[in-house]
Amino acid sequence: MASLLDPLGLLPRTVAAAKVGLKVAGWTEQQAMRMLGSRLAAPGNAPLELETPKPSRSLDQKMQSLLDRALDQSTDGSQSELYHRIIDQLVPDEARIISALSDGSSSPLVTIRTRTPAGGAGKVLLANASLVGRTANLALPHMTATYVSHLLSLGLLERGPEDTAMKQDYEILMAETYILKAIKAASRGPLPARIDKRTVRVTTLGRGLWEAATGGRL
C-alpha cells in the first residue's frame, strides 16, 4: 500500500526479498558445513593437526657438538671464545672493577656475619663488600658486594689475606652506610657482629682477559 514515506508501495516487496535472501544464505551456509564435515570424516583424510615446535637438541648432542668443535679449535681460538663468553656476562660496573684492579693492586674486602653463642662464625649477612666500589667510581656503589661476588664466581677476582697496611682504607670501608646497617643487623645483644677482613685482587684469568680486551686481541 502506498504512503507518504513509500509512494510507490515498494517497501513490502523489498522486505520480502530481503527475507528470501537471508533464507538462501542460511541454506547455503548449512550445505557448506555439511560438505566440509563429510570431507573431514571421509576415509583417508587425516585430522587437522597444529604444527608443534621442533624439540631442541638433547644434552648428548650438545656435548658432542662441543667436543667436535674442540678438535678443530686452536689454543688462541679457545681462549678468545672463553673471553667472549665471560665478557658477555659482565655489566659496566663490573668492568670498572676489573679496570681498577688491573694494575695488580688489592682492595679491602669485608664479610659481615653473626656470632654463635660460642663466639664462632654464624650466618653471613653481607659478603664481599669492598672499597673498590668507591675507587672504581661505580654507578651503583651499593651493589659492590654483589658485583665482587659475581666476579669471584667467574674466576676473575680472588680473595687474599688482610693487609694491615690498609688500616685507613678498612676504616673508610667500614663507614659505608650499607656496611653499618649489616653490622647492626648482625649484632645480637652482647654479641657483636663478626667482621672478617680480607683483600681482593684480579686473578691470572682476569688479567689475561683485561690485556686481551684492551690490547685488541679479542
Image: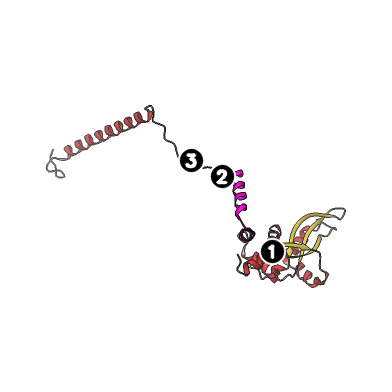
Res 136 label? none
Reply above or below: 98 against 31: below
Identify the colour scheme used.
secondary structure
Q: CA distance from mark 3 to mark 2?
A: 15 Å
Position of 20 with respect to 101 (left or right) is left
Residue stretch in magenta: 51-80
Which is nearer the N-term, disc 1 or disc 2? 2
Q: Quadrant of residue 77?
A: bottom right
Q: Residue at 68% of width from left, 65% of height from top?
A: 208
> How crowded is the residue under tag 2: few (<14 C-alpha within 10 Å), some, or many (20+)?
few
Which numbered disc, 3 or 2, marks the residue that appears first in the sequence?
Answer: 3
Q: Residue 16 or 65: which is nearer the viewer?
A: 65
Residue flagged by tag 1: what amino acid is it? Gly
- Magenta highlight: main SS: helix
| Number of the label disc, if any, that sits on residue 57 | 2
The amino acid sitting under disc 3 is Thr
Is disc 3 placed on a helix, strand or loop? Answer: loop
Total marks placed: 3
Q: Secondary structure at mark 1?
A: helix
Residue 206 disc label: 1
Residue 68 picture location, percent across and down? 60, 49
Q: Which residue is mark 3?
A: 52
Report how far apart the C-alphas of labels 3 and 1 lie in the structure: 44 Å
Query: How busy is the neighbourhood of tag 1: few (under 14 within 10 Å), some, or many (20 plus)?
Result: many
Q: CA distance from mark 1 to mark 2?
A: 32 Å
Name the amino acid type tagged 2: Arg
Query: Which residue corresponds to the image point at 22% horizontal and 38% vertical from the top-left?
Result: 18
Q: Is residue 69 magenta?
A: yes
Give the residue displayed 67% in from the left and 69% down from the top.
99
